[in-house]
Image (cartoon, rainbow, N blue to C red):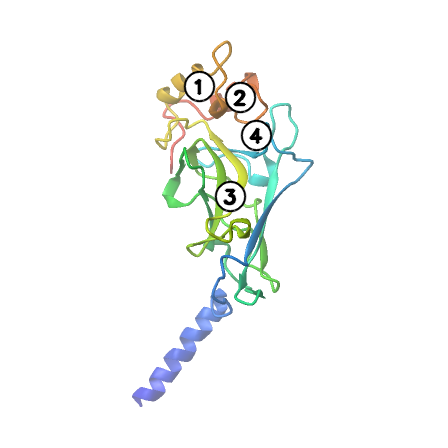
Amino acid sequence: MFKGKLAVLCLLAASLLMIQGIAFAGIIDACVSNCTLSGVGGGTPGINGNFALFVCPQGDTDTFDDQIGGLGSTVGFLISITMLETGSIPIPNIPGPDFWLVDCDPINDAILCGGSASSGADSLTNAAGTTTMGGLGGFQGGGCVDGMSVVVQGFALLDPVVSCASAKCLGISVRSSDMNGDNIVALADLAIFATAFPPQPYDTCADFDLSGIVNLSDLARFAFHFGPPGHQCN
């Protein structure tokens, strides 16, 4: 009788895993899996060759694929991801929330609300093991970094160019009105921004759209995410 009950429980557990898309997932090979970055809507990289991602602790910013430049031009981007196991076999049905971003900037840090740097992938991986990141929602966080890496189920996707010795670093520059990275937009951030506004010396962390200058467009974006009690992590 016990064996019969155990068999039923095992079948039930397997069914639940299949419904969640886990039973079909293989073991991730972080070296043969891949991610690429491309512009959408005519998007082109900014002055440092990176795409700008403006973020706020409250998460009330544009999605990756709808970032707005200083002159009103769309400078959005999309991350395309292909998940493979050893032998380059596609891994389908990896859930969207299993994907996130971490910074790979050796000097600066991105501050991630709730420990997650993005909204996840836009969908389950399909039969070819592919999905995208970019269209589901805003990034909750702050700080100023140049470079982000894709992490899937705890595995950072690796860069084959360096024999998979390190994570693949994508050309994404995070900029935020939370300039000091304390999870809230407050007077301290305003003071930092003021030191970068002309005629003060240029500070790339205040250049929210990577246009090469800090101007009224950057001020307007900062002001929108500032004010009592200040935009902060939910």
The mark that comes first in sequence, 3 or 2, is: 3
Q: Which residue is mark 2?
A: 218
Q: Which residue is mark 4?
A: 48
Tell me what residue is drawn at x 51 percent, y 57 percent: 31
Using the numbered discs, state the Cα–Cα distance from disc 1 to disc 3 in whole angstroms: 27 Å
Residue 159 is situated, as x and y percent measured from the top left of the image, at 52, 50
The mark that comes first in sequence, 4 or 1, is: 4
The mark that comes first in sequence, 1 or 3, is: 3
The mark that comes first in sequence, 4 or 2, is: 4
Using the image, determine if residue 12 lies above or below residue 20: below
Left/right of residue 52 with respect to residue 227 in the rendered view: right
The mark that comes first in sequence, 2 or 1, is: 1
Using the numbered discs, state the Cα–Cα distance from disc 4 to disc 2 in whole angstroms: 17 Å
What is the count of numbered marks? 4
The answer to whether the residue labelled 2 contacts the one labelled 1, judged by CB atoms less than 8 Å apart, is: yes
Q: Give SS at disc 2.
A: helix
Name the amino acid, label 3: Cys
Residue at the outermost right position: 42
Left/right of residue 109 with respect to residue 65 in the rendered view: left
Residue 9 showing in the rendered view: yes
Residue at the outermost left position: 2
Using the numbered discs, state the Cα–Cα distance from disc 3 to disc 4 in whole angstroms: 14 Å
Residue at the outermost bottom position: 1
Q: Which residue is mark 1?
A: 193
Mark closer to the observer (3, 2): 3
Name the amino acid, label 4: Asn
Q: Residues within 10 Å of mark 2 (few under 14, many from 20)?
A: many
Q: Residues within 10 Å of mark 3 (few under 14, many from 20)?
A: many
